[in-house]
Image (cartoon, rainbow, N blue to C red):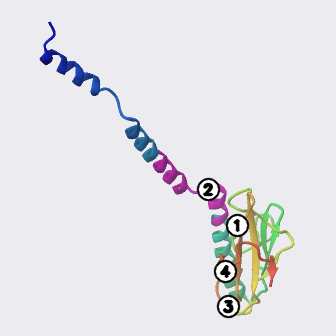
Amino acid sequence: TGSPSLLRPLQRKSKARGFTLLELMVVVAIIAIATAGVTFAIPDGSHTALERDAQRLAALLDSARAQSRASGLAVTWHATPDGFKFEGLPQTKNKNTGEMEDLSSLPRNWLSPATSADPDTRLALGPEPIIARQAVVLSNAGRSLTVATDGLRPFSIDLSQGGDAKAGAL
């Protein structure tokens, strides 16, 4: 005959199997929140590349502006189809080729091949200590950033306009 003490261990074992639906839903929700947090923490590659090019261009424009003031020569910057170019920097004759070359070793290409600026944009960088308000809009993968100066302060990324400003002298 079946004794009640023999049935109790069987009943306990049947209750201790698996997880409840609520426990599974809590675990899935925690995993979803953690995944969303990681997704937002990873920067977008094209946006990072555009910011890096904008910061670099701001530094290069300030460097060329300082060289213009030091040499007393008018220096301009303009975008080209494959990068950009500084004109008017002090030059020296290359001993090997005999051609005139810029004393400055300023780069002429973007860090990201996808970055571009309007080729009609021209910036006058000096030699006057105060220049006109100027800006250039950089684009990469459908996004844009504006690098600008008010003429007195250094060039910087202009977040107030969000890349919607007209390029060139304002």
Q: What residue is rendered at 67% in x and 69% in y? A: 54
- Quarter of the image for residue 101 reads bottom right
Give the alpha-carbon distance from disc 1 to disc 2, as whole Å. 25 Å
Q: Which residue is under mark 1?
A: 107
Comparing marks 1 and 2, which lies closer to the viewer?
2
Residue 44 got which mark? Answer: 2
Q: Residue 56 location, x and y as percent?
A: 64, 69
Q: Residue 96 location, x and y as percent?
A: 76, 64
Q: Which residue is under mark 4?
A: 155
Give the alpha-carbon distance from disc 3 to disc 4, as whole Å. 9 Å
Name the element at disc 1.
loop
Residue 43 within the magenta-colored segment of the rendering: yes
Comparing marks 4 and 1, which lies closer to the viewer?
4
Residue 152 got which mark? Answer: 3
Q: Quadrant of the C terminus?
A: bottom right
**Which of the pair 161/168 is nearer the observer?**
161
Would residue 28 be seen by someone viewing this image from the given angle? yes
* Mark closest to the chain's N terminus, 1 or 2: 2
* Mark closest to the chain's N terminus, 2 or 3: 2
The magenta segment is 32-51
Comparing marks 1 and 3, which lies closer to the viewer?
3
Q: Are marks 2 and 3 in contact (CB under 8 Å)?
A: no
Dominant secondary-structure state across the stretch colored magenta: helix
Q: Residue 160 location, x and y as percent?
A: 67, 78
Give the alpha-carbon distance from disc 4 to disc 1, as whole Å. 17 Å
**Which of the pair 82/158 is nearer the observer?**
158
Disc 2 residue crowd, few under 14, some 14–19, many 20+, Cα 10 Å: few
* Mark closest to the chain's N terminus, 1 or 3: 1
Q: Are marks 4 and 1 in contact (CB under 8 Å)?
A: no
